[in-house]
Image: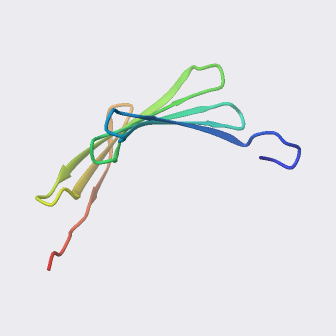
Amino acid sequence: HYPDGNLNEKITYKYDNFGNLIEKRIYDNENKLYRYMNDEYGNVIKEDIFNAKNKFIKSYRYEYLYDEKGNWVEKKVFENDKPLLIYEREYSYF
């Protein structure tokens, strides 16, 4: 909350029947919507952004490559379905 009592953001969560987070929505103080969709590992796989009039602005899509332990080792980021970034991680298991 702001000092005047207005909300600076509102967040809602949606879970599947197993208690896994599958969707998160954030409404900012300008009423823009940021909608995040999650995979079964809890990683964000899609982010959609809408303006205050619910008009689509842009979308991000995330693709993951997982190792044998279930940790992602590669994450590809697409903006409006165009390749944007590739993140790589390396794990050492003992």
Between 36 and 53, the one lying in front of the other is 36
Between 25 and 85, the one lying in front of the other is 25
Name which quarter of the figure residue 77 lies in: top left
Residue 40 image point, x, y percent = 27, 42
Q: Is residue 63 left or right of residue 35?
A: left
Residue 53 image point, x, y percent = 64, 19
Look at 21% across and 68% down and name the residue there: 90
Q: Is residue 19 left or right of residue 72?
A: right
Q: Is residue 70 left or right of residue 54?
A: left
Name which quarter of the figure residue 44 lies in: top left
53 vs 9: above or below: above
Here the colouring is rainbow
Between 36 and 58, the one lying in front of the other is 36
Q: In the orientation shown, which residue stands out farthest toward the right?
A: 4
Q: In the orientation shown, which residue stands out farthest toward the bottom?
A: 94
Q: Is residue 45 left or right of residue 93?
A: right
Look at 15% across and 60% down and name the residue there: 69
Look at 57% across and 20% down and name the residue there: 55
89 vs 36: above or below: below
- Tell me the quarter of the image containing the C terminus: bottom left
Residue 1 image point, x, y percent = 77, 46
Look at 68% across and 30% down and name the residue there: 31
94 vs 9: above or below: below
How many numbered marks does the figure carry?
0
Residue 2 image point, x, y percent = 81, 47
Name which quarter of the figure residue 18 lies in: top left
Q: In the orientation shown, which residue stands out farthest toward the left?
A: 68
